[in-house]
Image (cartoon, rainbow, N blue to C red):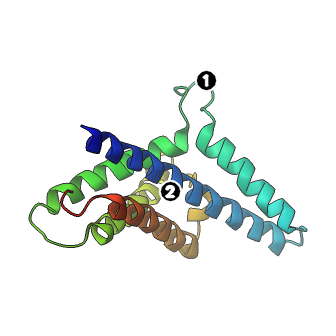
Amino acid sequence: MIKGIIKIGFLFLTILLVSFLVGAQTTVSNLIWLSSIDMPVTFTVLISSIYHDFILMTLTSAQPPLPPLPVLPIIISLGLVISFGVTWIVLRWLKTQKKYAYGIAGAVALAFIFYLMPLVFFGVDMLAGARTLTGKIILVICGYLGGHFFGSRLSKGES
């Protein structure tokens, strides 16, 4: 029972970590674009923007037509729960290190998220960081890091 609660806690931490990384990647890609059109972007602006986007994208609820839940973590939660569930089943037959298996699952989850978001949101890339190939690669790396974090926190005897 306690081990299950700890795993759920690590899952929430993983969702928070991936949400932060995705938000930071989106913020940095926007700031790089602003810098490319000669807008001054200082280190203070960078840190302040990442902080505010983390608060607004990850911890703030959606506006009234949507349920009062933070949208980005909910989308990431759905992707990670599905991919981690499939990984948990696959690990019953394959013997590999959990940190790598869950890392790949996290990367696949983020790839599906940025692939499916334009289909769900009428052709609009909701993540500005997913508009370029480099941004998509970085988002996949963010998913891998989250999955690796989750898999490395699981005990060796369980999946």
Q: Tell me which residue sits at (56%, 76%) in the image.
A: 134
Return the residue nearer the eye: 121 or 151.
151
Q: Residues within 10 Å of mark 1 (few under 14, many from 20)?
A: few
16 left or right of 52?
left
- In the rendered view, tell whether residue 148 sits above or below residue 14: below
In the rendered image, the quadrant that contains the C terminus is bottom left
Please name the residue shown 16% across and 63% down the image.
91
Whole-percent x and y of residue 98?
A: 27, 66
Q: Splitting the image into 4 quarters, where does residue 113 fall?
A: bottom left
Please state the horizontal and vertical placement of residue 53, each as a whole percent of the image. Answer: 70, 50
How many numbered dots are placed on residues in this image? 2
Q: Quadrant of the N terminus?
A: top left
- Residue behind mark 2: 18
Secondary structure of the residue carrying tag 1 is loop
**Which residue is the extreme one toward the top?**
64
Amino acid under label 1?
Answer: Pro
User: In the figure, is residue 6 to the left or right of 132?
Assistant: left
In this rendered view, identify the residue nearer to me: 116 or 91.
Answer: 91
Nearest to viewer (mark 2 / mark 1): 2
Nearer-the-camera pick, 5 or 50? 5
Q: Secondary structure at mark 2?
A: helix
Residue drawn at x 57%, y 24% is 65
Quickly name the residue at label 1. 64
Q: What's the residue at 54%, 28% (across, down)?
A: 66
Mark 2: amino acid: Val
